[in-house]
Image: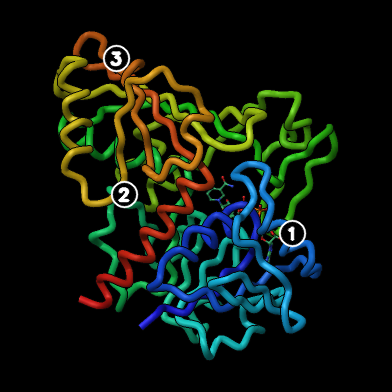
Amino acid sequence: MKTRVLINGIGRIGKAVLKQLMQNKDFDILAINEINPYLENIVYSINYDSTYGALEDKFKIVNKNFIKNSFTKIEVLNFKTLSDIDLSNIDIIIDSSGKKEDIKLLKSLDVQAIFLTHPNSKADINVILGANEKELDYKEHKVISTSSCNATALLPALKLLDDKKQILCADIVTVHPLLNHQRVLDGSFVASETRNVEYNFEFGRSSTQNIIPNKTTTIKACSYVLPKFNSTLISSSSLRVPTDTVGAINVTLFVEKASSKEEIIDIFEEYENNQEFKVMLNNNEPLVSSDFKKEKYTTIIDHRYTDVKNGKMIKLLLWYDNEWGYASKVVDILKFYKDIKKA
Ligand SMILES: NC(=O)c1ccc[n+]([C@@H]2O[C@H](COP(=O)([O-])OP(=O)(O)OC[C@H]3O[C@@H](n4cnc5c(N)ncnc54)[C@H](O)[C@@H]3O)[C@@H](O)[C@H]2O)c1
């Protein structure tokens, strides 16, 4: 039986999830809920995309509040909160609105599961493939966070090296494309339902003219998945850059067990050849960020920059598509959830 899905919030991540999940015959996207009240605008922004290109099979509006292409017909709703929606024909919700909804309210919804596309310490579980998917239990876990793009890219690599070499401490710097909550030109930085103002004033500055430093929640998000990877072990910072998608993470690790550069590369190559999900891919080509656009592997280890000093300091450069790549992991987690439920 097909799993009937509602997507809440059809922004950058909602659209990337929609376009990938539409291809999967085990899922039926029955509804989208979006606070944007302009249906014409929603359809337009699904059909055309500056980053990933236009849809070949375009949607049209039918029957007032439905959108339809050759294969899919989806109802478009306009509610402020999920609790106002009739969910009688929905099995799972993907909440890609970014809204930090009350977890009690989410748990009370009459669906099998709610997948949040942001890290959430109050969710029943935060899942990253290649880190803790074996802990996912459909009977116990109803509110399931699929963590953040950075943590999804970073944690499998950290876990692998910790299992083999035991990490003593580390530092990461994420280089992240701009996001919709930023300003095009300088302005105020105000709180919203999806971003609180404790962030920093630098996000009120022009996103296209600056490299914007900020704190990152990446390590906090990792700790919700595997508690040992926390801010006592790992320091972090982030640079927001004026590109549309594809991030990079510069990782420096100090480890207990000494190794050579060749041994570290072998560890990642062995992982790539034996993995269950598309998590890690090794790269040795002279590529730049846009070459990783639409890459579905969670993280690409760029071995042109892999290095080891004195046996115990390891340097890595990781790439990841923070939109399409992350959304592909949300879809993989949904497939995994469905598989364990069937088994
Ligand atoms: N963009 C990324 O790189 C990325 C990667 C991983 C996770 N995320 C997370 O995914 C979430 C969405 O991020 P995004 O970049 O797609 O943001 P976005 O601003 O592009 O999209 C959010 C969408 O949700 C809608 N929305 C807001 N509140 C709503 C509500 N109450 N009900 C229904 N719709 C609502 C907005 O109108 C918008 O269309 C955030 O939590 C973000 O942290 C983003």
Using the image, determine if residue 217 lies above or below residue 56: above
Q: Earlier in the sequence, mark 1 or mark 2?
A: 1
User: Which percent across, then down, holds residue 51?
Assistant: 63, 41
Disc number for residue 307: 3
Which residue is label 2 attached to?
226
Q: Earlier in the sequence, mark 3 or mark 1?
A: 1
Q: The disc labelled 1 sits on which kind of residue?
A: Tyr
User: Which percent across, then down, holds residue 307?
Assistant: 29, 14
In this view of the protein, which residue sits in the foreground, 214 or 243? 243
Alpha-carbon span between mark 3 and mark 1: 46 Å
Quarter of the image for residue 157 reads top left
What is the crowding at mark 2: few (fewer than 14 residues within 10 Å), some, or many (at least 20)? some
Callout 2 touching callout 3 (CB < 8 Å): no
Which residue is label 1 attached to?
44
User: Which percent across, then down, holds residue 275?
Assistant: 21, 46
What is the crowding at mark 3: few (fewer than 14 residues within 10 Å), some, or many (at least 20)? some
User: Which percent across, then down, holds residue 244?
Assistant: 63, 36
Q: The disc labelled 3 sits on which kind of residue?
A: Asp
Q: The disc labelled 2 sits on which kind of residue?
A: Leu
Alpha-carbon span between mark 2 and mark 3: 26 Å
What is the crowding at mark 1: few (fewer than 14 residues within 10 Å), some, or many (at least 20)? some
Mark 3, secondary structure of its residue? strand
Tell me if residue 237 can be seen: no
